[in-house]
Image (tube, helix red, strand yellow):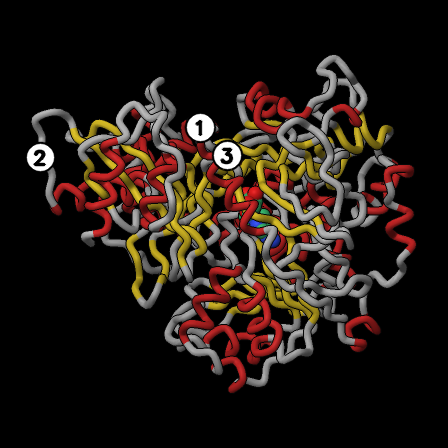
Amino acid sequence: MSNQKAEFSEAEIAVHWREEPLISPPPQFIGQANLTDPAIFERMSLEHFPECYREYADLLTWYKYWEKTLDTSHPPFWKWFVGGELNACYNCVDRHLPGYRNKTAIHFVPEPENELIQHITYQELWVRVNEFAALLRDFCGLKKGDRVTLHLPMTAELPITMLACARLGVIHSQVFSGFSGQACGERIADSQSHVLITMDAYYRAGKLLDHKKQADIAVEKATQEKAPPGKVLVWQRYPGRYSAETPPVKGRDFIVNELLPKYRGQRVEPERVQATDLLFLMYTSGSTGRPKGCAHSTGGYLAYVAGTSKYIQDIHPEDVYWCMADIGWITGHSYIVYGPLALAASSVVYEGIPTHPDAGRPWRIAEELGVNIFHTSPTAIRALRRAGEDVPSKYHHHFKHMTTVGEPIEPEVWRWYYNVVGKKEAVIVDTWWQTENGGFLCSTVPALKPMKPGSAGPGVPGIHPVIYDDDGKEIPAGTGKAGNICIRNPWPGFMQTIWGDDERLVKQYFARYCKDKNSKDWRDWPYFAGDGAMQSSDGYIRILGRIDDVINVAGHRLGTKEIESAALTVPEVAEAAVVPIPDEVKGRVPDLYVSLKPGVTGDGALAQRISQAIETQISPVARPRRVWIVPDMPKTRSGKIMRRVLAALSTGGDPGDITTLANPEVVEKIRTQVAQR
Ligand code: WT7
């Protein structure tokens, strides 16, 4: 509760933000847009729900048409397109062959600039996916419903592996390659994956990293959790050459590129799966406990990402589309791989960091490939802006459309994106959604609604947001008050469950505002997103951030609990509390407070060890800005650590009323300590 209070005071500050003026989309954009008919909002109104979502499902090719659009018999486990059969790989690859065989499906851009870009056509993608699917089936014995963990970097092999799994009906679970071996191992164990698929090495910020060593740590961790994967498949970053220092483990690790020649020319019939069968798991941090495996369906998910890619991303088959995110996050699954490929677009996969070797790199790539749709996060935009405000102006790229996603964007930063990156030629959409959701929830429809810097916009067609106060009363638009954003209706992209934990799905997303838990009417089950938001009178929504204790660092969602647990693995640490601190580039960074066990004293070396523990157990992105070793934590009388007070001390703010604390005197001590730095 203390955290929600802290965030609410932040929300209250936000109401004093000034309303930004609206900016119209350029006429050239409107002239070519996929969606210019305002009747879409009527067609997808609640009155036509749920049948309106046929329009999205009809973008796909079905082996068998569905019988029931929405089954609500087991709330809130909504089932979409029940009885329908399809294959995601077929929809993203095979069906494009007659029309687009020789068109590029994936442009793979290696980080080293002297390495040639690979242009993989739909035909070549089809061949490579078939051969790898044959290997997965015949060498690994994988079949429909099995789970496989991927710990792959941003190379063409990642979408190839995902699509090969999808072809077989195997559920893939890609773990962000920047996550540690331990984090990967935990996810292998949670999903009970049969196989781990990784790569020997990849480039990041100019260095060829030994990635295979993470696989060894991952297997060790999964083994500790009594769920070792049977096999480890290792792709080579340079086919024919092993690039990691860590050697393969005999009998356990197999080099994909050595096995593949045996599967030359093999073709695998796409598995017909039910619309409700799972396509993939995507782990995301929650406020408590272990990461949640968001389990996404095949039919509903694919229909939803195809629909939103077409109407919100405005993807046409002729477009060269670059989503500069990592496929290890949901953004990459939905809007690098499944959405764009379902529409036969050419999608860019870039291996490295945006500022390597300098901040002009994204615009050189855009120029070379003729990218016309560009998609990235406020963090990346802030970093590029800091590295050189006028750099984009030196290049001759032209975007028709740009996207921002992952966290709120400051209007100042938005304007730089619009004026300098987009040269005032591109329409911008600010898309708000979450891993759990599969696809966009709030955004403007680019040819139909004007842009407003800093606001995501209204719900996308078919999504009906509502903002509730703490008591469940609707906060009307235009009152300037913030509350909890919810979605009134189900939609096809929402996950089926949290892997292995149905109960947690109900508790986390529906219990808060459920009107009647015995009801089978979806109207009684609004989806609680966990973000604070406010709606201005024109219906545009400004997202204020998480209301639970998850920290969004540079677009990476980290659980405070995860970080605190990692800190507590250092033997000297007694208590740990993480608070989010605003950061100019990353949005938020964690500040860590620890108190030590009695009789132990701490120094810089200990702080260093704690940081290191977090880095190895979670990721370098979770590394705290500061580790404060404090004499005690400010606590309530019931013993709860008051993170709100710590957050105020970290930012030099007012901790508010501390008289009810069990140990108010400690606040002054910490304040002095923090001020001395
Ligand atoms: C959280 C979800 C959705 C893919 C990337 C992150 C924040 C996301 C926006 C936006 C303001 C945003 C929310 C949300 N968020 N997009 N356009 N404006 N905030 O996915 O890791 O599941 O994080 O990111 O707080 O709840 P995720």
Residue 558 vs residue 489: left or right? left
Q: Secondary structure at mark 3?
A: helix
Q: CA distance from mark 3 to mark 2?
A: 33 Å
State which mark lies toward you, 1 or 2.
2
Q: Position of residue 631 (x, y in %)?
A: 18, 33
Question: Which three-letter amino acid code belongs to the residue tagged 1?
Answer: Thr
Question: Which three-letter amino acid code belongs to the residue tagged 2?
Answer: Thr
Q: CA distance from mark 3 to mark 1?
A: 14 Å
State which mark lies toward you, 3 or 2.
3
Circles 3, 1 touching at the beta carbon (< 8 Å): no
Q: Residue at x 64, y 42 (%)?
A: 438
Label 3 crowd bin: few (<14), some (14–19), many (20+), radius 10 Å = some
Closer to us: 336 or 426: 426
Q: Provide the residue designation for mark 2.
A: 601
Q: Secondary structure at mark 2?
A: loop
Closer to us: 462 or 640: 640
Q: Quadrant of residue 169?
A: top right
Q: Provide the residue designation for mark 1.
A: 288
Q: Residue at x 38, y 24 (%)?
A: 227
Label 1 crowd bin: few (<14), some (14–19), many (20+), radius 10 Å = some
Q: Provide the residue designation for mark 3.
A: 4
Q: Is residue 37 visible?
A: yes
Q: Is mark 1 within 8 Å of ligand 1?
A: no
Q: Residue at x 54, y 21 (%)?
A: 501
